[in-house]
Amino acid sequence: MDVVTFLLKQSMVGLSQDPDALWNQNFFQLGNRGTRNFVAPKYYPGPMTNVTFSNGSTHQITNVARVNFPLDGISTGEEAYAVFCPRALASASASATAAASSAAWSTAIPSSTESPPSSPTIPLYPYPAIKHSANSVAGYYLNDTGYTDVAVLQVRDFEAADEDPLTYSMEFQAVVQKFLYAAVKTGKRKLIIDLQGNPGGHVDLGTDLFAQLFPSIPPNSKSNMRDHLGFWILGNVASSNVTAATKTPDGGEDELVSELTYMPLSYQSVVTDDLKDFSDFNSYYGPNELYGGNFSSFFQNNYTDASASDFEGTGIIVTGTNNRTDFRQPFAAQDIVVIYDGYCASTCTVVSEYLKSFAGVQFIALGGRPQSGPMQAIGGVKGTQVFQFVPNLYQWLDLWESPENNLLGLANGTIWDNFTLDPILRSQVVVTGAGTGGSVNGRNHFRFGDESETPLQFVYEAADCRMWWTREMLYDPVFLWERVANMAFTERKGTQFNSKYCVQGSTGHPTSISGAWRNGTLGPQVPPANASASVEGWKLTGRPLGQNDQGRVNTGVGVSGTSSNIKVENNAVESLADSLGLSSMKQACANYTGDKWLVILVCNALGVKID
């Protein structure tokens, strides 16, 4: 199999929704800490990988599995079942006890243990001016001649595992504040924000980051959720519980716990998109018809309330609210640029929406498939809240089964009749708290002013410029930042990128600021006929790279093409999808007669052409 075709196929099993972001996840990148898909594929690759080079030589690599769970003492299927499903034979009373205690267990903060001292640097990066102890955010100054007025704010994520949310978030906020203040005081006039490899995290930290950069712009957001019977039942019960907690003698604390536990189910835990309270659950739930479906009213987290600023209750006071006022904007919007590698999801996309739509900050994307044309900066999920197996599901299952749920009868005669806690209660995760399988981002995110009211998850948005990776950029972040500084702060004229390092055809796309995109709009969402996200590539006004591209001015770049002489064989890439499910989807595509462009793209990617 041709190597480019192989890598394109392999990339399609990744987690991102953009094909260029998926392509990048095949390879090592300094800003992305995860294991690359080529090294650790998400499918069985066969016993061997055979590589044939263009000079005719070959190399055979033995594929091995790495087991991340102790298998000591397991030699039979029965023993494996007992280890991985420890509650499979639990009594009904034991199961009920586990269910009843699940909410309290899953919200408890684990007992703290002494952490090893933080390293003064982030591996492979220079010494920062300041950084978070968990390496989530760091600030740098460029010191080479011609760049001494440039600061770099690197944001690797908005949360860290095994960290107390409040302690982590307060340090995050302080690092950003101290760095921006010091940067301005020391004469820095330009700012690069590096969001490479950022998977998201606490929403209020993304909100606060934007608020520190642009304190005069309210960071309002606009979300909704699909209405369904489960939401109706759980939302009513959750709202009633919050009301009941308010009426108890120690109601303040009880109400807070209830709101955090039941966000965004209860109407008291969220506010409207213009920061007003909902009057009751009906005003929150709707239903509101949109594109033939029923959805909740538009809502957002109440970022002005420190006790509810984030659905995990991190508790920080967001800049611009309460006692964190009188902040000054540290950098002008035209003196800021953001760089991405396509891997930006959840909270990362929320702060990116603020930066583009509210402030007019421009984006540069790195890498992507071996073809010319634009690339999206944001390739991950664009929803605004992840619902995790731990802790959300346990809490909500407990709510469903609780004696206070007087609406359970509504589920009779529906698919909920078949619902049982048994598969969850018999799993190891109930006992140990390990694992987050089944996570889903369940909140749509919308752009203010968009009259079409299209969730941003389904919107194509090109970066203002796209760069190829070079050898130096892969291993030297300062080299990358200095090149970006040249492109954005020296060679850019107004909103137009004129750098020779912008990939051909990657600037001026009408969904980007460089293409005259206007605030409050999405830009044209009618992709060209060859935009199918298949192994042929998402060729937005682009073409495959060929030998005539090797003269481009990217130092260190090798020649890539969609028809190389390197072959990869004996890998089970073709067997990635369940045949029955795939056949069902193809049949649905064959019967489709509509004109929704996203459906057409998906069907074309499955090999069912729709004109």
Image: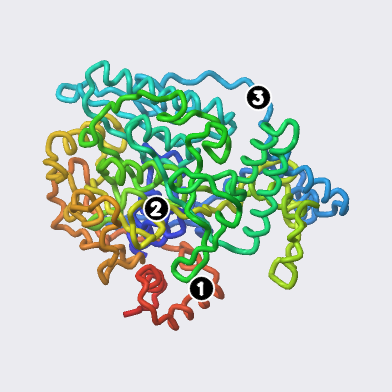
Q: Please identify, in this view, whether the residue under mark 3 or under mark 2 is nearer the observer.
A: 3
Q: Indicate the position of residue 557 as horizontal and vertical percent values.
A: 22, 45
Q: Which mark is residue 334?
A: none
Label 1 Cα neighbours within 10 Å, binned few <14 / some 14-19 / many ≥20? few
Look at label 2 and name its amino acid.
His
Residue under label 3, please give it.
Answer: 112
Q: Residue at x 43, y 24 (%)?
A: 324
| Element class at badge 2 | strand
In the picture as drawn, the residue positioned furthest to the front comes out as 279
> Number of callouts in the render?
3
At horizontal 50% and vertical 20% (from top left) the residue drawn is 118
Say whether residue 542 is left or right of residue 256: left
Q: Pick whichever of labels 3 and 2 is earlier in the sequence.
A: 2
Look at the numbered discs 3 and 2 and tell me whether their residues touch, using CB distance below 8 Å. no
Element type at mark 1: helix
Q: Quadrant of residue 179?
A: top left
Q: Which residue corresponds to mark 1?
A: 582
Residue 48's x, y, as percent?
A: 49, 57
Residue 59 is tagged as 2
Task: Of the two numbered discs 1 and 2 on the same chain, state the one appearing first in sequence.
Answer: 2
Measure how far apart labels 1 and 2 are at the Cα level.
34 Å
| Residue 426 in view, yes or no | no
Q: Residue 274, percent across and down? A: 43, 46
Label 3: which secondary element: loop
Q: Residues within 10 Å of mark 2 (few under 14, many from 20)?
A: few
| Up/down of 290 relative to 261, above or below | below
